Image (cartoon, grey):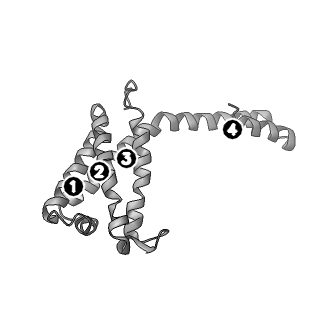
């Protein structure tokens, strides 16, 4: 596959008369930044996911989650004073698993078991999650739809579970 930056460099050289050495330095900086992102992106993504799950789960465990009312309205067959803290513990476990590399596989499994339930309010409580169905989302609806990003991040992190671990992981 061709490097688009290298093609841009060649065009700049010929069109603008930019010194070749300046372009080479810019290319070296670009390559160093991309290498750094490649090296640290996955561990950062895994740790960030872990922190988010521990944080959001902890809020539920301690009874201070702004999502508790939405959860209670969605899963109305179980008393919220029981279900919300249990869900919080589940989320904290996901986060811990994501932070401790040998348990990432388990964390991803727990995460994907939970995710379908996070979208239930879109179906069961459209009056709470939409201003205009199907595209106008309330704050609650946005809170739910952002889980698509979490799913994408989990897929990326999950794709690494069979790779050999490095020291930064």
Q: Residue at x 38, y 70 (%)?
A: 129
Q: Which label lies toward us, 1 or 3?
A: 1
1 and 4 marks in contact (CB < 8 Å): no
Residue hosting label 1: 87
Q: In which quarter of the image is residue 118?
A: bottom left
What's the distance in space between the residues labelled 3 and 2, CA to CA? 18 Å
Mark 2 or mark 4: name the one nearer the start of the chain.
Answer: 4
Residue hosting label 3: 48
Mark 3 surroundings within 10 Å by alpha-carbon count, few (fewer than 14), some (14 through 19), many (20 or more): some
Q: Which label lies toward us, 1 or 4?
A: 1
Residue hosting label 2: 114
Left or right: 5 in relation to 149:
right
Left or right: 75 in relation to 133:
left
In the image, residue 19 sits, relative to residue 145, either above or below, namely above
Mark 2 surroundings within 10 Å by alpha-carbon count, few (fewer than 14), some (14 through 19), many (20 or more): some
Q: Which residue is drawn at 27% across and 39% down?
A: 97
Mark 1 or mark 4: name the one nearer the start of the chain.
Answer: 4
Task: Identify which residue, 134 or 28, lies in the foreground.
Answer: 134
What's the distance in space between the residues labelled 2 and 1, CA to CA? 9 Å
């Amino acid at each position: 596959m061709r490097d688009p930056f290298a093609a841009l460099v060649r065009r700049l050289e010929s069109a603008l008369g930019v010194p070749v050495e300046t372009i080479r330095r810019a290319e070296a900086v670009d390559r160093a930044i991309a290498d750094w992102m490649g090296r640290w992106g996955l561990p950062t993504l895994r740790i960030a996911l872990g922190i988010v799950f521990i944080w959001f789960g902890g809020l539920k465990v301690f009874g201070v989650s702004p999502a508790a009312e939405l959860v209670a309205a969605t899963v109305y067959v179980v008393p919220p004073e029981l279900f919300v803290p249990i869900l919080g513990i589940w989320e904290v476990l996901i986060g811990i698993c994501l932070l401790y590399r040998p348990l990432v596989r388990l964390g991803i499994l727990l995460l994907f078991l939970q995710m379908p339930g996070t979208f239930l309010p879109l179906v069961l409580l459209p009056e709470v999650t939409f201003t205009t169905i199907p595209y106008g989302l309330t704050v609650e609806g946005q809170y739910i739809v952002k889980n698509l990003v979490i799913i994408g991040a989990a897929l990326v992190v999950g794709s690494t579970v069979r790779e050999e671990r490095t020291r930064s992981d």
